[in-house]
Image (cartoon, rainbow, N blue to C red):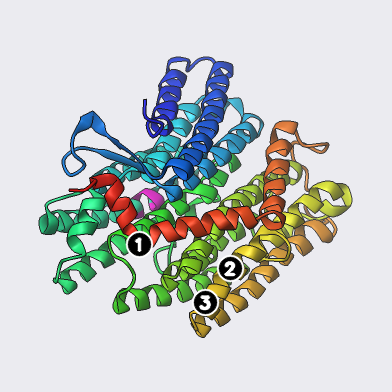
Amino acid sequence: MSPLLLPLLVPFVAAVACAFFQKSLKTQRTISFIAASFHLIASCSLLQTIRTDGIQVYLNGGWPARIGIALVGDLFSGIMLVITGLISLTVLIYSFKEMDNKLQSRAYFPLFNFLMMGVNGSFITGDMFNLYVWFEVMLLSSFILLAMGKKADQLEGSIKYVTINLFSSILFLSGAAIIYAKTGSLNMADIAQIIANSPDEKLLNSTAVLLLSSFGIKSALFPMFLWLPASYHTPAVSISSLFAGLLTKVGVYAMIRTFTLIFPLNNGLLQDLFYVIAILTMVVGVLCAAAQYEIRKILSVHIVSQIGYMVLGISLFTPLGIAGAIFYLLHNIIVKTNLFLLSGVILRKKGSCELKEIGGLYKSYPYFSTIFVLSAFALAGIPPLSGFWAKFIVLKAAADSKAYLLLGVGLAVGVVTLFSMTKIWAEAFWKKQPEEFPGEGIDTGTAPWQMMLPILFLTLCTFGLGIFGESIFQLCIETSTQLLDPSQYIHAVLGDS
């Protein structure tokens, strides 16, 4: 069996098995844990195979790539599968204790595994239509997970989420249909080969903008991000941490894949568009975050400005810029997931995440507070944590490209990010508990180990990425080099034809 099938089959089998054992939460937990662990191990093995043997391709049924369904694993896909496996395992363990049994019994585990299958499928598909299919698998699973608690704000957020994402799907299908009409193919490698020799620049640019709009909605770019702060803070913390860490990054992945392989950004108009979007996304995102007073809302809106840094790296379209975007992607998935998990512990201890209603966390829980501040500083880019190197690589790429406006905006946004994270620290951790609010949650002692173990592990990952990040950076450079040479991908999929 091709190793490319495992990231799809493992969560699918787990989802079906969990559905069969619907009345036994213990069995569903065990199945999901085994599946997530196996997914992580298989992804690490696949990445190692890609590094030693090159790009891996699986042609379903032996059909040629232009006709059949192709799965493709290059370095970028491999990295994303590994980080997805890591996040799914940590969030899953956390959810065992964070979510009550009633919520878990509402098909949480089958939906969790279907969501992972959709994410993995998006990373390894080599076909535009199948990318759309995997997007829809993710959308359906995430919509039900968002609405699972049946609270009014959850239903409102989930309706906004699904409506705007359906619009994104229409844009994507329209773009794919135009590409098919123009090239007669939906295979990405085949499309890239045909489009590279097409003289119809206006049609190609308009199609690229359609796809950018679709991916922009999924990754919450300016001005298409308003669905995100309305929805990500509403479900259980385990679900929102999974969404915050992974889902928007699938949109970023699709952008990097599309605009390095099919529509390379060596076109003046598209590259200028990316510049403008990167600046506006960073600035508007961080200003909106600074104006919020609920921890999960602050963290949600911060996703927007952080996505802006990744788009900045893409827009430069240099090996260092793309490598910086990938490094930033990995750093942000880890840190953002961890901050959401930490917010779940705050909610458990204080009964609220509203900054005006809580305080005194540092005095009562100094070790937990230290863990929080490390992740907050990592997000803000304080050395030597992972965020510092992520920002440094992206901003150095901007300086090397003489994109001084992007450089200046990136530095300024970093300062405002630090301000908004220190606001959380000053209000929730440093000031005393407000007298008018009791601040009593369901847990006044030590948080359960099922919640703290994933948090500690992700904090160590943040440290490791910052202090021992050279090997990861080298992997990002290798990945960037491979992405900027589409002939490797095209040759691996199409062969010598």
**Mark 2: secondary structure:** helix
Residue receiving disc 3: 398
- Name the residue at 54% across, 15% down: 24
The stretch in magenta equals: 160-164
User: Quarter of the image holding residue 123?
Assistant: top left
User: Quarter of the image holding residue 298?
Assistant: bottom right
Question: Which one is earlier in the sequence, the residue at label 2 or at label 1?
Answer: 1
2 and 1 marks in contact (CB < 8 Å): no
Work out whether 87 lies above or below 284.
above
Q: Residue furthest right?
A: 363
Image location of residue 395, percent across then percent down:
57, 74
- Name the residue at 55% across, 23% down: 34
Residue receiving disc 2: 393
Q: Is residue 488 left or right of residue 321?
A: left
Image location of residue 454, percent across then percent down:
68, 38
Q: Nearer the viewer, residue 150 or 334?
A: 334
Q: Nearer the viewer, residue 481 or 379?
A: 481
Q: Nearer the viewer, residue 480 or 114?
A: 480
Q: Is residue 183 left or right of residue 28?
A: left
Work out whether 236 lies above or below 109.
below
Quick check: is 447 in the magenta stretch?
Answer: no
**Mark 3: secondary structure:** helix
Q: Nearer the viewer, residue 260 or 487?
A: 487
> What's under tag 2, amino acid-wise?
Ile
Image location of residue 433, percent across then percent down:
83, 55
Residue receiving disc 1: 260
Cα–Cα gap, marks 2 and 1:
19 Å
> Which numbered tag is attached to residue 247?
none
Cα–Cα gap, marks 2 and 3:
9 Å
**Mark 1: secondary structure:** helix
Image location of residue 164, percent across then percent down:
35, 55
